[in-house]
Image (spheres, grey):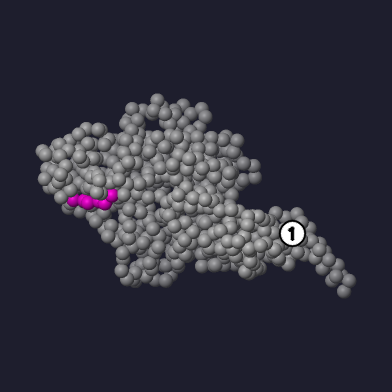
């Protein structure tokens, strides 16, 4: 009997010592008083914290709804109701073993002001988005290039696989450059910690949702980036991953409960087949593999049907917007998520931030496929999404890319762009689709079209005048090239972003004449967009392409812009009479990129492979 008592005392002493010395963290790390939804679920993580008697200190205006011990004694979940009567302060969460108590502090803050006006403003068709990779854009703080204790210690700009040292400070240093170009919204790849052994430059294998990747900077740096953007009248888009996380995430290495992840008897990857979700003949096995299979062996699939996982992800979304003043929300790998969870998540964000915009990555093939994942006008389908917008791969793959790489024909060339746009009836709001030429996963568009500058300017003119939200990828303005063999070749450094670079593309003097010509082409159209009601919010009308010439209009009650695209390798003649439906009352138009005025009263000779953007008067 004495032996058993000594064991008990020893066991208690071990717990007490652990509780006194351990690191205890709350997720979310803080919350706010006055939220639209007063409920928050706090996940407390600390070694054996759940083995004690859990209590929450009295806090006026805060009600403890429920305390749940997780299967893993290192976790406790505490459901709170924070009423509007609560004041900012710190809530104490205690774990008591014997006479010893370990305490976690959970701050409650005052909310930001300006919801929908100064933050959570939304990204809309009047914006011009700039996508960049923080590690590859500019190194503003060499002191954080390597961080002791992190698994990936590479720092080698000569390797496309290693870290290069770009960071948040580097982005801040060049915001004036982006503003001069005409950018109104910044989309950096994910900024959260990726403490993985290798290939950490992209940011899509998160290992801590509440800590900015230290090689990019700190949480304070991220907040400063947001503030600096807002000072310039620009916006911040956060890139988020709900579907998976990094293998070395603390809640993967130390799971709160057995069903935190989708786990299989042996490694099972997703089949990447979105059709399994709406195919009337699909098997349940294929659907399960699509949704629950892992994206890669290093990216475990999160079980969003577990309510604690769902709450963790949703609260991180709300926390990010409130903490950093995020304006837009881009969801990675949207089609692999549990769609019911995604609807719940989107709803929670929009209820708290009614003007915020959300768009999901829908790398699928076919307008019906893409429309399925966003708000749509589809009839009897298995699921109705509340996602406002998507990344519009269809206008890229089957639109502008086909127009410039395939010869014109009844169903080919620019006819594909016309046909793709004609299917916009499937979307609830086509203007919320994000259009682009390339991104961090695709071949550089300038390479796709054989480094043909005439074609490239045509494509850029299309991007900045078509329906939807235009997005540039860093280096589009510099004719950056590269194919995804592998993807590192489309993720090269922005020259001039590192001390000692021989070339500085951030300045006109550092760019070649051809680069400056493209830069100015983008800048001229981007600056025009800022004051063009027709391009920002106007309607669109398109005409059937004839012999490789495609014409569409952007217009409203005060402005009409006529876009004329000649995709043929030889000159074409355009008769304006065909377009009287939209040109009536106008006699001329000024081409925005060149400043040349053209008469609408006589036939017009179009240069080979060119596009006019005529502001009619």
**Residue in the image at 35% along x and 34% along y:** 519
Q: Residue at x 75, y 64 (%)?
A: 96
Residue at screen point 79% across, 61% down: 100
Nearest to the observer: residue 579 or residue 200: 579
Q: Can you see residue 246?
A: no
The residue furthest front is: 85
Q: The N terminus is located in which quarter?
A: bottom right
SS under mark 1? strand
Specify the farthest residue to the right: 2
- Residue at image point 26% right, 58% down: 423
How dense is the environment of label 1, judged by Cα within 10 Å: few (below 14), some, or many (20 and up)?
A: many
- Dominant secondary structure, magenta: strand
**Which stretch did the figure color magenta?**
538-543
Q: Quadrant of the C terminus?
A: top left
Residue 472 percent across, percent down from the top left: 38, 43
Residue 345 lies, with reference to residue 125, above or below; the image says: below
Q: How many marks?
A: 1
In front here: 292 or 372? 372
State the residue position of label 1: 102
């Amino acid at each position: 009997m004495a032996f058993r008592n000594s064991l008990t005392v020893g066991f208690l002493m071990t717990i007490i010592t652990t509780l006194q010395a351990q690191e205890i963290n709350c997720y979310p790390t803080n919350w706010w008083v006055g939220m639209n939804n007063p409920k928050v679920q706090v996940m407390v993580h600390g070694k054996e914290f759940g083995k004690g008697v859990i209590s929450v200190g009295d806090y006026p205006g805060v009600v403890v709804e429920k305390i749940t011990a997780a299967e893993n004694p290192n976790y406790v979940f505490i459901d709170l109701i924070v009423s509007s009567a609560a004041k900012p302060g710190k809530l104490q969460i205690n774990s008591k073993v014997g006479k010893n108590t370990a305490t976690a502090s959970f701050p409650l803050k005052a909310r930001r002001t300006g919801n929908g006006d100064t933050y959570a403003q939304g990204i809309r068709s009047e914006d011009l988005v700039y996508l960049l990779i923080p590690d590859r854009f500019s190194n503003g703080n060499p002191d954080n290039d390597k961080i002791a204790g992190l698994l990936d210690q590479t720092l080698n700009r000569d390797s496309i696989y290693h870290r290069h040292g770009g960071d948040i400070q580097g982005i801040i240093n060049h915001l004036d450059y982006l503003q001069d170009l005409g950018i109104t919204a910044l989309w950096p790849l994910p900024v959260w910690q990726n403490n993985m052994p290798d290939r950490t430059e992209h940011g899509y294998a998160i290992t801590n949702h509440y800590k900015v990747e230290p090689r990019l900077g700190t949480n304070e740096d991220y907040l400063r980036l947001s503030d600096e953007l807002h000072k310039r009248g620009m916006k911040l888009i956060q890139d988020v991953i709900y579907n998976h996380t990094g293998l070395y995430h603390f809640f993967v290495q130390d799971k709160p409960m057995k069903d935190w992840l989708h786990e299989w008897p042996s490694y099972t990857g997703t089949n990447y087949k979105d059709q399994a979700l709406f195919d009337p003949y699909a098997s349940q096995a294929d659907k399960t593999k699509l949704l629950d299979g892992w994206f890669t062996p290093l990216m475990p699939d999160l079980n969003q049907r577990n309510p604690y996982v769902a709450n963790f992800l949703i609260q991180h979304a709300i926390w990010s917007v409130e903490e950093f003043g995020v304006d837009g929300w881009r969801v990675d790998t949207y089609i692999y998520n549990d769609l019911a969870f995604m609807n719940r998540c989107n709803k929670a964000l929009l209820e708290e931030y009614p003007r915020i915009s959300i768009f999901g990555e829908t790398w699928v093939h076919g307008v019906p496929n893409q429309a399925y994942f966003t708000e749509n006008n589809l009839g009897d389908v298995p699921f109705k999404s509340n996602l406002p917008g998507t990344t519009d791969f269809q206008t890229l793959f089957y639109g502008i890319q086909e127009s410039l790489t395939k010869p014109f024909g009844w169903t080919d060339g620019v006819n594909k762009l016309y046909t793709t746009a004609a299917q916009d009836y499937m979307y609830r709001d086509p203007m919320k689709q994000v259009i682009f030429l390339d991104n961090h996963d695709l071949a550089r568009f300038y390479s796709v079209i054989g480094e043909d500058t005439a074609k490239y300017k045509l494509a850029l003119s299309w991007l900045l005048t078509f329906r939807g939200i235009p997005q540039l990828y860093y280096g589009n303005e510099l004719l950056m090239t590269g194919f995804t063999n592998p993807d590192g070749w489309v993720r090269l450094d922005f020259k001039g972003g590192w001390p000692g670079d021989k070339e500085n593309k951030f300045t006109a003097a550092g760019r070649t004449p051809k680069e400056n010509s493209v830069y100015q082409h983008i800048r001229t159209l981007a600056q025009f967009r800022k004051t063009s009601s027709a391009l920002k919010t106007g309607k669109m009308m398109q005409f059937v392409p004839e012999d490789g010439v495609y014409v569409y209009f952007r217009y409203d009650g005060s402005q009409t812009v006529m876009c004329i695209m000649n995709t043929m390798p030889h000159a074409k003649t355009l008769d304006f009479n065909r377009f009287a439906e939209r040109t009536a009352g106008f006699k001329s138009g000024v081409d925005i990129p060149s400043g040349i005025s053209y008469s609408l009263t006589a036939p017009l000779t179009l240069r080979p492979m060119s596009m006019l953007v005529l502001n009619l008067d």
